[in-house]
Amino acid sequence: MSPENGEARALASEIRGQLKDPGKVFGLMIRFRLREGMQQKFEATFAKAIAATRKEAGVVSYELNRDAKDATRYFLNERWKNWPALQTHLEAPYTVNLLGEITPMLAAAPELHVVTPAAE
């Protein structure tokens, strides 16, 4: 198993462990802190995965945002129809590659939050 594949599996396990109902809509909010000077490379690397991800049947939304005050901080907001949709995404080659490519650009481990709809 490649290191990237191991990262995807660990991420999947962490997310799945937080879902009460894997058949329902849920979201992910992930904060990234980059090493200084990695912004352009990070955005270019993500751009390829964003285009592919937005074509997936199970994605509701997938957006990478840059912090207006801190150029080294980014937020990825994702919304998925259900757990199987995200699981398919995490196993896609472009996702596995993305995880491997961005890891050296990070100043700290990403901060992951699993969220569920409220007041709907």
Image (cartoon, helix red, strand yellow):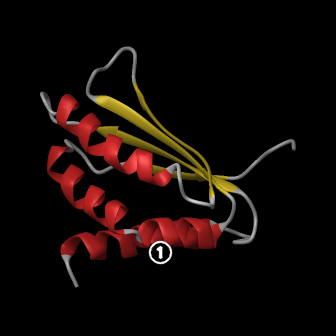
Which quadrant would residue 84 be assigned to in this image?
Answer: bottom right
- List the single residue furthest toward the bottom: 1
What residue is rendered at 20% in x and 78% in y? 2
Residue with the most extreme right position: 120
Give 70 or 78, whichever is nearer the viewer.
78
Residue flagged by tag 1: what amino acid is it? Ser
* Residue 44 versus residue 36 in the image, above or below: below
Disc 1 element: helix
Left or right of residue 54: residue 110: left
Q: Is residue 52 left or right of residue 7?
A: right
Identify the image quadrant of the N terminus.
bottom left
Left or right placement of residue 18 versus residue 120 in this view: left
Using the image, determine if residue 107 lies above or below residue 67: below
Give the residue drawn at x 25%, y 44%: 45
Residue 64 on image: x %, y %: 43, 36
Residue 87 placed where, x, y %? Answer: 52, 72
Q: Using a 10 Å C-alpha cutoff, classify the residue at mark 1 as few (fewer than 14 neighbours), some (14 to 19) or many (20 or more).
A: few
Q: How many labels were placed on the picture?
A: 1
* Residue drawn at the location 14% of the way across and 29% of the way down: 36
* Residue linked to disc 1: 13
